[in-house]
């Protein structure tokens, strides 16, 4: 499935069900190594039943993607990403910065202050989906696919799954490989 994401297919989802302790995460870790070797970015998130804020956890994981990109890219490559993000989201760059504060680390110091001082629009679910979809379009590619591994999906909620669905439904050149694992014995057949 990951090879298809890197070739011509685009985004793809893969689900792994099984009992707790059955080796689902270990199986995914073998793929993670391949993604990292191929130049891709890996985001891992384990949903927590106690925290109960899956959408915020997902956004936090995507914010961590910004740090990965910052580490792997040169200042010139980061400037290209900033230009593409600015073209893609326009005045909503401030909103992206509010969602993913680490995106500001892509900006040179002079632009950073200016970007943070701009006002922002109010966010709703549709605008969050739009901004994150645009972000993924820019930062994921054939040469740098993004693998999003979400463990314990049974603890997720409709908002977090809605954002993931929105990103994966994008029919552009984005390259996102979604892997979700869940405890099959804790999910009903209607889920």
Image: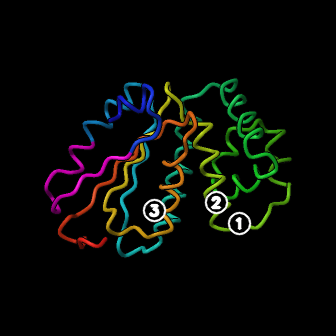
Mark 1 or mark 3: name the one nearer the start of the chain: 1
* Label 2: element kind: helix
Q: Are marks 2 and 1 in contact (CB under 8 Å)?
A: yes
Mark 3 or mark 2: name the one nearer the start of the chain: 2
Residue 25 is a magenta residue: yes
What colour-coding does the image apply? rainbow
Binning the other alpha carbons within 10 Å of mark 2 as few (below 14), some (14 to 19) or many (20 upward) gives: some
The residue segment tinted magenta is 13-28
- Left or right of residue 9: residue 81: right
The quarter of the rendered structure image containing the N terminus is: top left
Q: Are marks 1 and 3 in contact (CB under 8 Å)?
A: no
- Measuring from the top left, give residue 29's x and y in whole percent: 27, 41
Residue located at (85% from left, 55% from top): 117
Q: CA distance from mark 3 to mark 2?
A: 13 Å
- Measuring from the top left, give residue 59's x and y in whole percent: 54, 58
Binning the other alpha carbons within 10 Å of mark 1 as few (below 14), some (14 to 19) or many (20 upward) gives: few
* Label 1: element kind: loop
Q: Is residue 191 above or below residue 65?
A: below
Which label number is shown at residue 128?
A: 2
Front of the two marks 1 and 3 = 3
Q: Nearer the viewer, residue 163 or 169?
A: 169
Q: Circle 3 sits on which residue?
A: 161
- Measuring from the top left, give residue 144's x and y in whole percent: 50, 29
- Measuring from the top left, give residue 134's x and y in whole percent: 64, 45
Q: Nearer the viewer, residue 190 or 122?
A: 190
Residue located at (42% from left, 73% from top): 51
- Left or right of residue 143: residue 137: right
Q: Are marks 3 and 2 in contact (CB under 8 Å)?
A: no
Q: Nearer the viewer, residue 76 or 136?
A: 136
Marks counted in the figure total 3
Q: Circle 1 sits on which residue?
A: 123
- Left or right of residue 188: residue 89: right
């Amino acid at each position: 499935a990951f090879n298809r994401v890197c070739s011509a297919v685009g985004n793809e989802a893969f689900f792994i069900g099984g009992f707790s302790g059955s080796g689902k995460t270990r199986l995914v870790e073998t793929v993670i190594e391949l993604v990292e070797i191929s130049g891709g970015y890996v985001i891992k998130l384990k949903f927590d039943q106690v925290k109960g804020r899956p959408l915020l956890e997902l956004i936090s994981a995507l914010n961590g993607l910004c740090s990965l990109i910052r580490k792997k890219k040169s200042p010139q490559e980061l400037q290209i990403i900033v230009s593409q993000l600015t073209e893609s989201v326009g005045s909503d760059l401030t909103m992206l910065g509010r969602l993913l504060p680490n995106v500001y680390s892509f900006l040179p110091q002079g632009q950073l202050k200016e970007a943070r001082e701009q006002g922002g629009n109010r966010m709703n679910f549709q605008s969050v989906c739009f901004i994150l979809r645009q972000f993924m379009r820019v930062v994921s590619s054939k040469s740098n696919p993004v693998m999003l591994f979400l463990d314990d999906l049974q603890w997720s909620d409709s908002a977090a799954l809605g954002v993931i669905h929105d990103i994966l439904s994008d029919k552009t050149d984005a390259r996102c490989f979604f892997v979700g694992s869940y405890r099959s014995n804790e999910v009903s057949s209607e889920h």
